[in-house]
Image: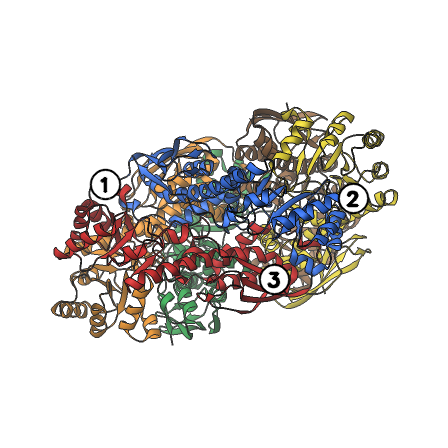
Chain colours: A red, B blue, C orange, D green, E brown, F yellow
Amino acid sequence: MIPRIVIEKRLKEFLEEDLSIGDVTSAFIPERKSKANIVVKEPGTVAGIEVVKILFDLMDVSVADSVTDGSMVKKNQVVMNVEGSSGNILMAERTALNILGRMSGIATVTKGMVEKARRVNPSIRIAATRKTTPGFRIFEKMAAVIGGADSHRFFTGDAVLIKNNHLLLIGSVKKALQLAKSTSFIRKIEIEVRSLNEAIEAAEECVDVIMFDNMSPDMIRAVMDRIEELGLGKNILFEASGGIKPENVEEYARTGVDIISSGYITHSARMLNVSLYLV
Amino acid sequence: MIPRIVIEKRLKEFLEEDLSIGDVTSAFIPERKSKANIVVKEPGTVAGIEVVKILFDLMDVSVADSVTDGSMVKKNQVVMNVEGSSGNILMAERTALNILGRMSGIATVTKGMVEKARRVNPSIRIAATRKTTPGFRIFEKMAAVIGGADSHRFFTGDAVLIKNNHLLLIGSVKKALQLAKSTSFIRKIEIEVRSLNEAIEAAEECVDVIMFDNMSPDMIRAVMDRIEELGLGKNILFEASGGIKPENVEEYARTGVDIISSGYITHSARMLNVSLYLV
Amino acid sequence: MIPRIVIEKRLKEFLEEDLSIGDVTSAFIPERKSKANIVVKEPGTVAGIEVVKILFDLMDVSVADSVTDGSMVKKNQVVMNVEGSSGNILMAERTALNILGRMSGIATVTKGMVEKARRVNPSIRIAATRKTTPGFRIFEKMAAVIGGADSHRFFTGDAVLIKNNHLLLIGSVKKALQLAKSTSFIRKIEIEVRSLNEAIEAAEECVDVIMFDNMSPDMIRAVMDRIEELGLGKNILFEASGGIKPENVEEYARTGVDIISSGYITHSARMLNVSLYLV
Amino acid sequence: MIPRIVIEKRLKEFLEEDLSIGDVTSAFIPERKSKANIVVKEPGTVAGIEVVKILFDLMDVSVADSVTDGSMVKKNQVVMNVEGSSGNILMAERTALNILGRMSGIATVTKGMVEKARRVNPSIRIAATRKTTPGFRIFEKMAAVIGGADSHRFFTGDAVLIKNNHLLLIGSVKKALQLAKSTSFIRKIEIEVRSLNEAIEAAEECVDVIMFDNMSPDMIRAVMDRIEELGLGKNILFEASGGIKPENVEEYARTGVDIISSGYITHSARMLNVSLYLV
Amino acid sequence: MIPRIVIEKRLKEFLEEDLSIGDVTSAFIPERKSKANIVVKEPGTVAGIEVVKILFDLMDVSVADSVTDGSMVKKNQVVMNVEGSSGNILMAERTALNILGRMSGIATVTKGMVEKARRVNPSIRIAATRKTTPGFRIFEKMAAVIGGADSHRFFTGDAVLIKNNHLLLIGSVKKALQLAKSTSFIRKIEIEVRSLNEAIEAAEECVDVIMFDNMSPDMIRAVMDRIEELGLGKNILFEASGGIKPENVEEYARTGVDIISSGYITHSARMLNVSLYLV
Amino acid sequence: MIPRIVIEKRLKEFLEEDLSIGDVTSAFIPERKSKANIVVKEPGTVAGIEVVKILFDLMDVSVADSVTDGSMVKKNQVVMNVEGSSGNILMAERTALNILGRMSGIATVTKGMVEKARRVNPSIRIAATRKTTPGFRIFEKMAAVIGGADSHRFFTGDAVLIKNNHLLLIGSVKKALQLAKSTSFIRKIEIEVRSLNEAIEAAEECVDVIMFDNMSPDMIRAVMDRIEELGLGKNILFEASGGIKPENVEEYARTGVDIISSGYITHSARMLNVSLYLV
């Protein structure tokens, strides 16, 4: 979905970030046509393959073969074979591995969360947040999607999301939602609530998504039941958020919410261990 | 050390990455002059304060007070007070928190590693690697330095580092080092070795730094002893690398190496939990 | 809503587009501190005032006074007084006038359409399209909003909009909407329909917005009536589109649609006549 | 004349302006190799073909066939056939149509003006002004040239043009022209005059172009006659400017001026109606 | 004449070229408020003062005092006093000196050429060429102007200049000039000639400038005399070009040409020796 | 060593600097497929061939044949044959020649210095400084390397270099070096000394490189002898700097220093005379 010209622009910046005006080690090594394998050193879900293909293309290295994004891989599995001048392969190496490692780390954690949650609530969506690394968001969101998550908002402009800080400035849920609707019809309106009353007020205003912020699973269920009793929830999606991680995701999924948004999958995923070997 | 114009350029890109052409939620909220606190929700070492000050400055928000980079903070400690138009504060919020959270996460892990290692080897350096998030490296390196680490190479051009892939292309340690010296006198030369013989060959060529790659602490000690016996190690620094983490850092530190380089502090640090509250 | 750093970046490009590396006429004219007025030469709705203030600020020219965006102005009304070095005023002149003239032209046409439509349907929205001038979209959308319109989508990423070309590729309205829903919950889904059957199919899938593409007002009314009879339209917005202009906007507004989208307000608005005079 | 690298840079910005980080509609539609036609929905003079070819090339869409820039086309005429992945065609669509529509709109109006003027004064030039849309000038100037106009100044650096505001700062036509000549010999010098006396003063200083600003055709003729009587006009070009449009262009052309500059062709041209259809 | 935003953009690039992401030496030196002098170590004409003021401003260093651009200075004369943080002064140092040194070197050589030439032909202009250093042209042209020269063309778009390679493609001087005139009336037309016949042909077509390319002074005089005899030269400027340097500039000036263009002043000027001292 | 994407980015800026939005002369000349030769008009060492190949590639001109970088060429030798559209060749011409001419000028001077110095001290290195033209440094450093020199520091971040201004801020050589070592182990540390005592102090701190700044050859030899007597110089490199040029380079080389750094090769080299001829 992300146009190639957008990805290329960022990849050029990433290469410059690593290489600056050149690699003093590759500089003195006799160039020769080489092959290399990229190997994943631990099991996981691979993400970043399509991105790294573009990266190697920018460095005139050709990709002979590769697994597809989203593949589950085993320890020491080769995920990509490349071919080109040794200097170019080695100049692209670290950036390629950083992209693959970070994206695969996120996809792996995400997939785990999604599977756990869906076992108890098959139609639930795990959604990424904006708690991403500055400069690398589009790749982290992409990785989350490859891992089975919903991208949620990329930008603050993708949907209205009224948070506690906004409510503080406006005064009431009702007023906030009425203002929100007056701006544009084209974006969904989501609101973060912290109590039953706020949730009801939001539902009465026909908000698109209600996010339960840092509520316990029991509390969430109680609020959802009450809204149903009042006949208010028909076209509203419910989202749980705040401190949800692999350990407690099933509990939240069981509440019956439509969406669980999880900062965890981006802010706490570590890099998958990936290496490149000349062969 | 990083010039403000360089930081500003990247911060503008980060803001655009989050805001694109604007925040549709802040858009309809009545502007007013507000104050806000940034609070750390868990104990740790704070990093990113100076960067975030520049960020708020770019958004016309003034920073009234803040802790200094490197401060150890307690759970729920306020680390910064800001003041400005509510819209600008909320537009800067997520980017500010992402920077502070990521950098503090790295600084916190780093500080832990440094302290553990220095307890057994007081002059040792923990060094960051290039296993960073593309687009965010300078901030991750900065965070590692704030946490007490050495920055090691920012770019591939900062020093010669001959790795296994390079050796494969050249054939021998000796030949690699002779070539390296012929390029320029101005940069240090480091080489990754995997055996006693390679280490001795490197020491004979008066390399600046020998990196023991994925060797056990015992093996490292044996190699260092042998090099000392041969009277070869005088001006050479020794660096251990590969899979070193909080759990085993002391063991490696005890070998007497000068440097431990650790991908862990950047690739496995999670974000510190930080929030912003309008007050 | 658009952050100042985003606007500044574009304004710098606009200034370079006009000045390249300098103005050979201002070059030889003795600099002196001057004042100037910007005058609108024909009645209209002014838009671009806030943008042009930033422009003059970039050129070190201060704005002493100005009308507000959205003001209705009379022929020959002064809309802004500026003060600064004569060279800087004259270097900013053409870019300032091009921005003000284009934006005011759009705001003026938009306001006319909105007023006409609301006289017969007080809650209707006129919405801008993506038929804008490449490189200038954010300013054209802003002008439409100042004129009373809804911005509709800025980017193709703001909402799903399934058009005829997409339907051709997928085969059916139903399948298209099911696919759309599977991607992300966070964006609204709009679909362009060309017949009663397509409209019903879309309504059955609970689409967010149904756009009647190039249908006559009678046809639109008939379709809306039928959907209501079927009890399907409750949470759906209806939008009319295609060839709607000042001459026929009332007819379409009378159909009771919620939104009229109009390429006309951007693709057929001419520039308002604006001049700058040193005083 | 405009180098391809310059055009590509701007086209990439235009694509990003429309697509941001991606098109959420194209995202879920199954990719397939498709063909599409671009059709002009009303008669006119087509401009932008060469530009749009580069645009499609950037998106990996190939152009099978097209009319040439400047072609007169009939209602519903196909002007271009393209072929490529459906996703890429649809992502390029709006930007391609906005470029073609805007440029063809300008070319069409320009051609009309040129033909009208040349019927009464066969060697006259219609010239575009700098009253263009910020960010899109080079394409608007190109369109005017394709429509038969002279580009006049692209930048303020292309020629000296002394306007009323400059005269106000300097004091006299004579002084202004003497200063202008002292700067560089390489650019032409044009001056805007508002009276017979100013015109004579300018002619005496051997200016390159005299622009009659907002003068009536009768007045222009009178001034030109007087200058001829005085034997002063030999190497001077005469340009009429100010409020000239299709309705009065012949009157001005009949005065015998060499050039008519017309803001009208850029500031009042509307977009030609162009559509893209998958086939 | 060059807008400050244009200069700032380039200066930021120059600073990044020198500092990349920072100066490792300034990094460990205790910051303190310092003063520094910039001293010219050899006599010459200073250029670059206004540019360097902007540079220091970008680095938050204030300029207390300075000589003006174009000043003749003696050996060891202080040309600027600055004040600011020691780190910022030292980070700006090399870029500031490189700018001042290069620009002053060019201004010094230029002034020498201009004075020599004007002693024998008081109204002659020495003009710079496009033989400049890529990336630094606007500053080299500026330096030439400060030294008393005419800037000639900045870009290939500033005037038509038909050179031998162009003539080869077109076939004749006459045809080339007729084509040139058909493009736009707004730019001057200059042609390079290599024989009397070409010169006459050009004069007959009323070209604006005739450039004698690599002709001897005697030959130039002969051609000019002949053109005068034919009554053709009235509104034509004559320019000598090709291998003109301080040693032979008087000879060429004596021919009576209006302009001498000199690659020498940019391609053969060396840097003036300038240093910065903390005080 | 410099990645192609880095070079391409700069070359595009250079082309835009020369062409802006186009070449008005090439514009009216009938396009045709042409061949051209690039000829060096005076003997020298050619540098820039690989760079110019990329430049022509960006302009869709193919390079049929060329000499290699570093070749010694004779007067009037053809160094490159190109083929492509005449318009593209002529648009690339000036930028290509400016690059080749500047780089070859530097390579030629450098080669002369290197050969002179090596005749008396075969292992000596001549090193370039940062006294380069802003915007063009990477090409000037590259040219110096092609001419046989060492590149020395590209950026201020490549190595620590403590100069007199830094010493002034810190107070003593010893303190400066201890601080320098505390920052990072990865970069070499060089210090500028002005007396025997400073040199000894530096040697005692095991600095990597001692630079003798503006010392006479006799003085340099005396200092080196004394350091040797003290048994301190083993792993230290000695560099002479300050006013060294072709006339005195042998004298300095004879002192036995390891490196001579020379601003002369960049700040005083003139452009080699190079031309392009359509054939």
Q: Is residue F70 above or below residue E48?
A: below
In this rendered view, identify the residue nearer to me: C251 or E233: C251
Q: Is residue F272 left or right of residue A154?
A: right
- The mark closer to the camera, 1 or 3, is 3
Q: Is residue C91 above or below residue F47?
A: above
What amino acid does circle 3 point to?
Tyr
What amino acid does circle 1 point to?
Ile
In this rendered view, identify the residue nearer to me: F133 or E173: F133
Q: How far from the left and from the top, in percent, is residue E207?
A: 63, 53
- Quarter holding residue B71: top left
Q: Kindly state the secondary structure of the residue where label 1 is placed.
A: helix
Q: Kindly state the secondary structure of the residue where label 3 is placed.
A: strand
Q: How many marks?
A: 3
Disc 1 designates what residue? A170
Res. D194 in view: no
Subunit that carries the residue with mark 3: A
Subunit that carries the residue with mark 1: A
Q: Are marks 1 and 2 in contact (CB under 8 Å)?
A: no
User: Whole-Å distance between the Cαs marked 1 and 3?
Assistant: 58 Å
